[in-house]
Image (tube, helix red, strand yellow):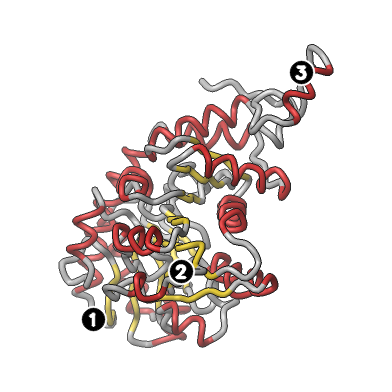
Amino acid sequence: MTPIFASSTWALASAREGADFAVETAPPAYYTRWGNPTVRELEDALADLEGGARALATGSGMGAIASAILTSVDRGDHVVAGSSLYTATTEIFTRLLPRFGIETTFVDPRRRGAWKESVRPDTRLVYVETPANPTMMITDLSEAVSAAKSVGATTLADNTFASPVNQRPIEFGVDGVLHSATKYLGGHSDVVAGAVITAKRSLFDRIWFVYKMLGPALGPFEAFLVRRGLKTLPLRMEVQSRTAQSLAEFLEDRRGVRVVHYPGLRSFPQHALARKQMDGFGAMLSFELNGGYRAGKRFVESVDVATLAVSLGGTETLVQHAASMTHGPLTDQERRVSGITEGLVRVSVGLEDADDLIEDFDRAIRAA
């Protein structure tokens, strides 16, 4: 088992050694905000899984996302981002970055040519989330990377929903891959963590410098839990993805359900693209109920086998009503742009028996 190095600081052999560590990038035995052997072991495993040069583990997914975004832009720069993103990521682009004169153009990732049309000479970041939260929109990674390279911009991709089992964006030319390691990487709803994996060491060095100042460090105990979760990641994803497919097919034929968003369905508009760039379709899905806002809330409050809760990627099935919960902080206009309808329910499929979940959802839809 990976040893847990609980030290916050390390004894130094000399002042000279301390001086060398003070100017080194991510030394593993100096001060745990800078680096830690347990954390480093996790980082090496994540870099290997994603096919990257280096990885940086953080205290939350947003710690990784914020560090990577702030590294990639300066005052007055321009960003192009997908229109359907995790709420806190959207808020960075719409609430935080404008304070520094940084403008963001949101594009529909489903529209061919949208990335290329939206980049400008001052674009310094192209930000992708695929599949997107919670609409499951797929971004053509090759198209986004090509658009970014045409203006010399950095490309970042949030790969949380797919996990490295189903998708590895660096293989498509992405510069940095982001994860909320709280989700599938940890996989047991018992740790909050994040990670950024870079294709090249130079980008890692730049992100680590910003991270060192912001301080979203991951503790060694939490790193141990994520590293332990990685051991069962392929097994969990296989079972959860298979159950998600069965549940999506049931919902697609269920009266009262307007539409199901799951890349594994042939009816999903981007099914062919998902097949092209993903090894599997994952365990996340969403669906829209005919009854709108009230029906969505009623459904999530009526499940019994599934659990009403935020977050995702654990062993238990979680449901949440996006318009009133995770995406509630957004304005009505921002939700419309993101594709969040009033009756949309997001589902993170766990390890329960598929028949039990189908029966549970059938009963909850009748109640809604």
Say left or right for 157 vs 64.
left
Q: Residue at image x 36%, y 44%?
A: 164
Q: Which image quadrant is residue 366 in?
A: bottom left
Judge the density around disc 3: few (<14), some (14-19), many (≥20) Cα neighbours within 10 Å. Answer: few
Camera-near label (3 vs 1) is 3
Tell me which numbered mark, 2 or 1, is placed earlier along the sequence: 2
What label does residue 17 carry, if any? 3
Percent of width and height locating residue 343: 41, 82
Q: Residue at image x 43%, y 49%?
A: 175
Give the camera-side residue of 247 and 327: 327
What label does residue 81 carry, if any? 2
Percent of width and height locating residue 75: 65, 67
Position of 294 relative to 212 (above/below): below
Camera-near label (2 vs 1) is 2
Element under disc 3: helix
Give the camera-side residue of 212 and 306: 212
Number of callouts: 3
Q: Amino acid at mark 3?
A: Glu
Q: Between marks 3 and 2, how big is the CA–CA gap? A: 43 Å
Judge the density around disc 1: few (<14), some (14-19), many (≥20) Cα neighbours within 10 Å. Answer: few
What label does residue 255 carry, if any? 1
